[in-house]
């Protein structure tokens, strides 16, 4: 049985969004202390995850919580 291509696309988009959200929250928590000390590598890594999360339409609440750390 073949899956409907539109359904498959929606499932893939949903999975990408959930994975991006999880990665963003996890890295934010791990980097919380080191980002406050201006570790440029970790700030850049978190910014990359923010960019990916934005592309995958992660809820703005998670993006804004992570963005506060990079400002």
Image: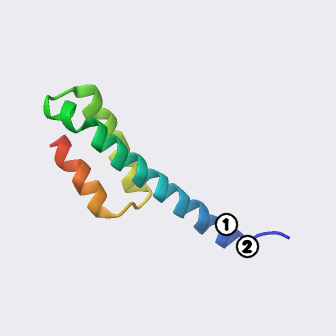
User: What secondary structure is marked by label 1?
Assistant: helix
Near mark 2 (Cα within 10 A), the count class, few <14, some 14-19 or many ≥20, is: few
**What residue is disc 1 on?**
8
- Identified at 29% across, 43% down, the residue is 28
Image vertical order of residue 27 relative to residue 4, above or below: above
The x, y position of residue 45, in whole percent, is 33, 34
Q: CA distance from mark 1 to mark 2?
A: 6 Å
Q: Nearer the viewer, residue 54 or 18?
A: 18
The x, y position of residue 52, in whole percent, is 41, 48
Q: Which quadrant would residue 40 be assigned to in this image? A: top left
Q: Is residue 61 left or right of residue 3?
A: left
Q: Which quadrant would residue 43 be assigned to in this image? A: top left
Give the colouring mode of the picture. Answer: rainbow
- Identified at 44% across, 57% down, the residue is 56
The x, y position of residue 31, in whole percent, is 27, 36
- Identified at 34% across, 41% down, the residue is 27
Q: Nearer the viewer, residue 23 or 49?
A: 23
Image quadrant where one finds the N terminus: bottom right
Near mark 1 (Cα within 10 A), the count class, few <14, some 14-19 or many ≥20, is: few
Q: Are marks 1 and 2 in contact (CB under 8 Å)?
A: yes
Q: Is residue 3 left or right of residue 16?
A: right
Image quadrant where one finds the C terminus: top left
Q: Which of the numbered marks, if any, corresponds to residue 35? A: none
**What residue is disc 2 on?**
4
Q: Is residue 14 left or right of residue 8?
A: left
């Amino acid at each position: 049985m073949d899956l409907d291509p539109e359904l498959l696309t929606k499932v893939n988009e949903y999975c990408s969004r959930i994975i991006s959200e999880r990665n963003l929250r996890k890295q934010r928590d791990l980097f919380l202390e080191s980002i406050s000390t201006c570790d440029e590598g970790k700030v850049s890594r978190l910014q990359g995850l923010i960019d990916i999360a934005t592309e995958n339409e992660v809820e703005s609440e998670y993006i804004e919580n992570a963005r506060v750390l990079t400002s």
